Amino acid sequence: MLIALDGPTANVFGYLLPAYPLLIGTACAVTALLVLALYAGVWAPQRVATMTLVMAAAAIAAGRVEYVLYNARFFAGDSGQAFNVASGGLEPRLALLAAVGVGAVWTRRADKPLRPLLTALGAGLPLIAFAAWWGCAAASCAYGVEVDNLQNYPAWQVWEAAGEYLMVAPRYAVQPLGMAASAVTIAVVLGLCALGVRGARLLMAAVILCFGGSAVLGGLRGDPALMLAGLRADRWADLAACTAGVAVWIVKRRSRIRTA
């Protein structure tokens, strides 16, 4: 097989690559192509490509910073691992915020519309989420809480998978459930696109669905996490992202109604 996954490693045309960054990188590359396509005829391709590269760099840095903050106790004892992105460990919320921030500044300085970029990010976010859950399944990150016996739960809810220290055990199938939720989000976003939803409204719909699903699945996760008031810190961040998404959606909808 020319391309195959074998645990945390991907075999691509005979080259062994870490699956986690490969999957996310592929999804990001597809999103970058969407950005290029939506700016076709409006902006020089090389300028759009430069913007997307800077956005990607900012997103990776911000996503890694968020992950390190959530796992500060671990990285305090092994600070060198803080820069090892290939091992897994990118959080999406600050990454998305950084990408949008860089894009907003870049398009404003170039006097170009921001809407195509937001549309591309809205379409690409659930694809990136799907790749991230898949990558976590391969790299054994964001794994589920152990359960007593697979037979005591519906088949779709549990599976046997590796967790901490790569110990295989019956667990909640968090990563496959995340992939399924992301697939549904992809379908919903495509439906919204067919209905003519674009720009910030499309992106906020993707934000609400992606981070809403992540917040729900966070209750089934068994990987170590910083806890705040009885909830994982990343679940609080998911809820904050959903709240912001709903607020922006309402504001944009009201603005559209007033101008109609």
Image (cartoon, rainbow, N blue to C red):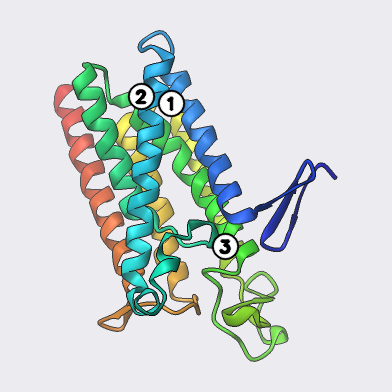
- Residue under label 1, please give it: 35
- Residue at the limit of the structure toward the front, as seen here: 80
Q: Is residue 104 above or below residue 60?
A: above
Place of residue 130 in the rendered image (x, y in percent of width and height, measured from the top left)? 55, 51
Instruction: Please state which of residues 4 and 61 is positioned toward the viewer in this rendering.
Output: 61
- Mark in the foreground, 3 or 2: 3
To which residue does mark 3 refer?
136
Residue in the foreground of this view, choosing between 37 and 260: 37
Q: Is residue 201 left or right of residue 60?
A: left
Which is more N-terminal, label 1 or label 2? Answer: 1
Residue in front for this viewpoint, 98 or 53: 53
- Compared to residue 221, the image places residue 129 above or below, namely above
Q: Residues within 10 Å of mark 1 (few under 14, many from 20)?
A: many
Label 2, label 1: how many angstroms apart (C-alpha)?
A: 7 Å
Considering the numbered disc 1 on the image, is that residue within a helix, a strand or a loop?
helix
Measure the C-alpha gap from mark 1 to mark 3: 26 Å
The quarter of the rendered structure image containing the C terminus is: top left
Can residue 187 be seen at all in this image of the molecule? no
Residue 116: image tag: 2
Tell me which amino acid carries mark 2: Pro
